[in-house]
Image (cartoon, rainbow, N blue to C red):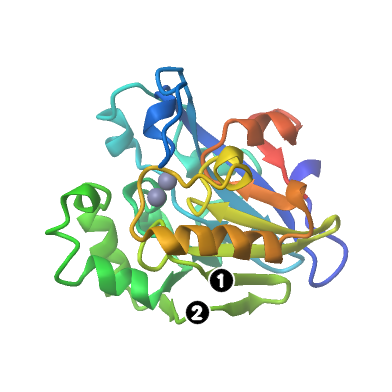
Amino acid sequence: MIDAERPDTPGLWRVFAVQYATRTALRSTHFHYPDNRGGEPHPTAYYVWLALSQTDTVLIDAGLAPSTAEGMQGLDYFGSPLEIIGGLGIAPGDIDLCVLTHLHYDHTGVVADLPRARYVVQRRELEYWNGPWATRIEQERWLHSRPDIDHVAASTRLDLVDGDRELLDGLSVHSVGGHTAGMQIVRVRTARGNIVLASDASHFYENIESDNPFAILHYLPDMFGAFDRIQELADGPDHIVPGHDPLVSERFRAVDRQPHVVSLG
Ligand SMILES: [Zn+2]
Ligand SMILES: [Zn+2]
């Protein structure tokens, strides 16, 4: 299991993007500001991310559960994110920490299958989904999974964060909002520098590179604030990892015998 070997140096991490699904879609559904190419196909990739230090195992986001994936039209589901991670020699019980970047249904799916992980969520995010507005705002309410959120909210392993925090040496969360009320991004120190897992703060490279937010959003000004924060925290443009871009799987080196896993650093 050479590829999932842990780094030699304390405070450094190895990070993997684990793609568990793909879905065909139209370009017009992916950008806030339309252009004349809206009718072109624009596939979406679905990821979770795994970070390994010498001593800690961190899962960033919890993907889609098989039962939810089954009912999604046009989705090509490769398998549960936990099954794919199992191919790297990591079992659900090995995961110490699960950072939930936000509580959309495609980021919380297998959270209840982690037997001992601490859940790291922004307080604002959880309060929003359990507050008075989420169920009344039609363009947002379909995006959450009530059982997943109830599981997280009731857990004795829940760790609510206000703003930015270094969770472990070399791994920190940063609140940005925008896409959701309490969206957070993750910075991880790797041998090639600090990378930023932007998750849905920038679905595609093109969102951040062309300053054109994704179409689904909670608060537009914070979408732009998030783009700036991602760029400040990453050591360079190739250290930014968008949340749903199939190009991530093409630009980074595939892990041996794991066709759906690439090494980010
Ligand atoms: Zn989202
Ligand atoms: Zn998403």
Picture coordinates of residue 143, whole percent (x, y)? 27, 48
Name the foreground residue: 106 vs 70. Answer: 106
Q: Is residue 89 visible?
A: no
Q: Nearer the viewer, residue 130 or 180?
A: 180
Q: Residue at x 72, y 69 (%)?
A: 55
Q: Is residue 97 above or below residue 106?
A: below
Say which element carries label 2: loop
* Mark 2 burial class by Cα count in 10 Å: few <14, some 14-19, many 20+: some
Q: Residue at x 32, y 49 (%)?
A: 105
In the rendered image, residue 31, in percent from the top left (x then y), is placed at 44, 38
Name above or below for residue 121 compared with residue 218. below
Q: Residue 173 in the image: state x and y as whole percent.
A: 57, 70
Instruction: Please give the name of the residue rendered at 61% of the width and 55% of the height, measured from the top-left corner.
Output: 197
Q: Is residue 232 left or right of residue 243?
A: right
| Residue assigned mark 2 | 163
* Residue occupied by mark 1: 174
**In the displayed structure, would residue 133 be above or below residue 34?**
below
Element on which disc 1 rests? strand
Graded by Cα atoms within 10 Å as few (under 14), some (14 to 19) or many (20 or more), the crowding at tag 1 reads many
Amino acid type, residue under disc 1 in the picture: His
Q: Earlier in the sequence, mark 2 or mark 1?
A: 2
Identity, as a three-letter code, of the amino acid under mark 2 = Gly
Residue 69, numbered circle: none
- Front in this rendered view, residue 242 or 70: 242
Residue 114 seen by the camera = yes
- Residues at marks 2 and 1 touching, judged by CB atoms closer than 8 Å: yes
